[in-house]
Amino acid sequence: MDDIRRRLDIWGCAAYPEEDYPPGSEQGEVGGVDLALLDGEVAALAYRWLEGRWMEGDDKTLELCLEDLGLAMPQLSPAGRLYFEPAMEILLDIRHARSKPRP
């Protein structure tokens, strides 16, 4: 949990990238993924996990966010990838923690 909290703190200090989006995409949308919505979903999942308020449906949202990141990341500028890499790591850490058997 400390890794997730540390990554969230680092990610929270990062500036949202001002970048050029791929040709033909709407500003703020890459590969059919709304980046602002994705940003907020990842943050909400992370805070709920850290606060012990994981809700029904959050596992599905986590998987959808990972899928969206997988679609968007290859199309982002280097600054965009740098910004969203911690989000991917946070989600993977939560997925890993959720997969551990509980005592």
Image: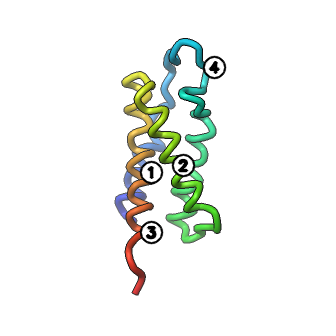
Image spot of residue 100 (x, y percent): 38, 74
Dot 4 amino acid type: Glu
- Tell whether 47 sits left or right of 75: right
Q: Spatial distance from mark 4 to mark 1, Cα to Cα?
A: 27 Å
Label 2 is placed on what type of residue?
Val
Q: Tell me the element at label 4.
A: loop
Query: Would you identify the image quadrant in which residue 55 lies?
Result: bottom right
- What is the residue that sits farthest to the top in this orientation? 23
Mark 4 or mark 2, which is nearer the start of the sequence? 4
Looking at the image, is 82 positioned above or below residue 66?
above
Q: Residues within 10 Å of mark 4 (few under 14, many from 20)?
A: few
- Which residue is rendered at x = 43% and y = 34% of the image? 83
Q: Residues within 10 Å of mark 1 (few under 14, many from 20)?
A: many
- Sequence-wise, the earlier of marks 4 and 3 is 4
Q: Position of residue 10 (x, y in %)?
A: 40, 45
Q: Disc 2 vs disc 1: which is toward the camera?
A: 2
Please, what is the three-letter code of the amino acid marked with disc 3? Arg
User: Could you give the CA–CA distance between mark 2 and mark 1, rounded to whole angstroms?
Assistant: 10 Å
Q: Are marks 4 and 1 in contact (CB under 8 Å)?
A: no
Q: Residue at the location (43% across, 61% down)?
A: 95
Eyeballing the image, is 35 above or below 18? below
Q: Which mark is residue 42?
A: 2
> Which labelled disc corresponds to residue 8?
1
Dot 3 corresponds to which residue? Answer: 98
Given residues 56 and 85, the one toward you in this image is 56
Q: Kindly identify the residue that appears in the image at 38 percent across and 54 percent down.
A: 6
Packing grade of label 3 (10 A; few <14, some 14-19, many >=20) is few
Give me the C-alpha separation between circle 3 and circle 2: 16 Å
Q: Which mark is residue 58?
A: none
